[in-house]
Amino acid sequence: MKRWLPVVVLIALLIPLASAESPAPQPTAAERVQQFQRNCGLIQTLVQGGLRLAAEEDPLKRAECCSGVAKRLADEIHRAAENQDRTRIVELGEHLNALLASGVAANLSTARRQIPQGSTLEKNLLEIRDQTASLVLPLEEILHRDAGSGGEEEIQRTLKILHNGRAEVEKALDLKDKAQTQGKP
Amino acid sequence: LPKYGLAAAVLLAILGWWGVASWPESPVPAQPRPAYDPLLASVMQRDLQLARANSPRERIEILADLADDLRSATRILAQASAGEKLTALAQLYKQVILDGIIQQAEALPAAERRQVLDPIAKRLSRADREVKRLVERVPAEYTPVLDMIAAAAHEGNRRLHALLREERS
C-alpha cells in the first residue's frame, strides 16, 4: 500500500487544483476609479450603516438599520435595471441577498426570541419584516421580466438569490420553524 | 494490502480516464466575469460582520478593519487621481476612527482594554506614518485628503493611549 500512497496523495492534491475556479478578476486602477465615482454614495450609506450597527445592541434596531441599507441597495438595483446594466444588477443583487439573510433576517430572528408575542414591539418586528420583503418583491418582478426577454442565466441566478433572501426575511419570525431546525420541542 | 493498493490505482486510473474523456476538446472560453468593486464588497462585508457582532471587542476589531479598507482604497484611488470625491472617503475614515473605534473603546471593560486597544493603537500609528510617506507619491491636489487621514489616525491613536492611561491610573 505504501508505494501507492504518494500517487494517491498527488492525485488528491491535483483534483482540487484542476477543479478550482479561476480567482475573481481584479479591476484595473482606471476601473477602480470609475467604480468609486459610481459607488461613492452607496459606500457612504454602508459606512454610516456600519457605524449605526456598531452603536446598537438591540437586534430589532439592528434589523431596522439593515433594512434601511437594503432599501438603498434595492433602489440602486432598480436604477441598474432601468439602465439595463446587468453586471451591476448581479453585483448588487449578491450584496442585497447577503444583507437580507445575514443582516435583516438574522437580527429579526434574534429579536423574535426576545420579544413576547402580542406585545407592541412585536408590531415593529412585523413592520420591519413586511417593509423589507416589499422592497424585494418589485425587484423580483422587474428581473423576472428582464430574464424573460433576454433569458440570461446571470439574471435568473440573481432573481433566485433575491427570492431566497426575501424568503429568509419572511420566515425569520417563525418561531416554530426555528425550534424545529434547532431540535427543540 | 497490495491488493488494496492495486484497487486504489485502478480506481484512480478509471477516474482519470473519465476526467480526460469528459474534458472538452476545444473548451469554449467562459465569459469573463466583470471585476466587481472591491471597496464596495469589503465595506459590505464589514457591515454584515457588525450586524452579527456581540461585543465591543468584536466591533472595535471590525471597525479597525473597515478603517484599513478605507485607507487602503484612498491610497490606490489617490495614486490613480480619482478626483474630488476622495475627500468623502477621508471623512468616512475619520468618522470610523473617532465615532466608531473610540466610542467602542470607551465601552470596553477596563480589564480588556490593554489587550484590545494596544494592537489597534499600533495599527493607527502605522497608518499615520504610511499616509505621511504617501504624500510625496500622489498628485499635490490629494495632499489635504491624505492629511485628513493622517490626522484622524493620529488623533485616534492619541485618544486610545489616553484611555489606556486611564486604565493604568
Image (cartoon, grey):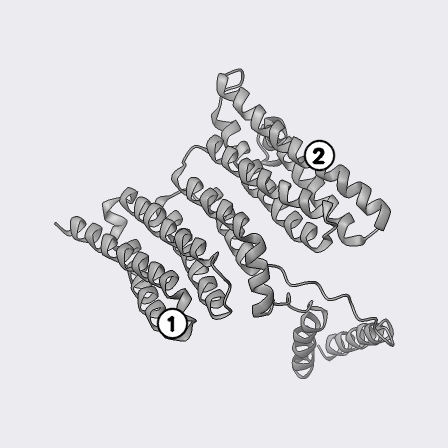
In this rendered view, identify the residue nearer to me: A178 or A109. Answer: A109
Q: Residue at x 32, y 49 (%)?
A: B98
- Residue picked out by circle 1: B134
- Inspect the image, locate mark 2, and give the three-letter code of the amino acid beneath it: Leu
Mark 1: which amino acid? Leu
Q: Residue furthest front?
A: B141
Residue at x 34%, y 45% (from the top left corner): B99
Position of residue A49 relative to residue B140, above or below, is above
Q: Chain of mark 1?
A: B
The local crowd at label 1, few if under 14, some if 14 to 19, many if 20 or more residues have their Cα within 10 Å, is: some
The local secondary structure at tag 1 comes to helix
Picture quarter with the N terminus of chain B: bottom right
> Looking at the image, which residue is at 26% across and 51% down?
B113
Above or below, A9 relative to B48: below
Q: On the picture, is A112 further left or further right than A132?
A: left
> Which label belongs to residue A137?
2
Please give left or right for residue A107 compared with residue A23 in the image.
Answer: left
Closer to the camera: disc 1 or disc 2?
1
Identify the residue at horizontal 55%, vertical 54% (top origin): B40
Chain letter of mark 2 equals A
Q: Position of residue B84 (x, y in %)?
A: 47, 58
In front of the other: B9 or B89: B89
Q: CA distance from mark 1 to mark 2?
A: 47 Å
Quarter assignment of residue A75: top right
Q: Position of residue B14 (x, y in %)?
A: 83, 74
Mark 1 vs mark 2: tell me if same chain. no
Q: Is residue B168 left or right of residue A88?
A: left
Secondary structure under badge 2?
A: helix
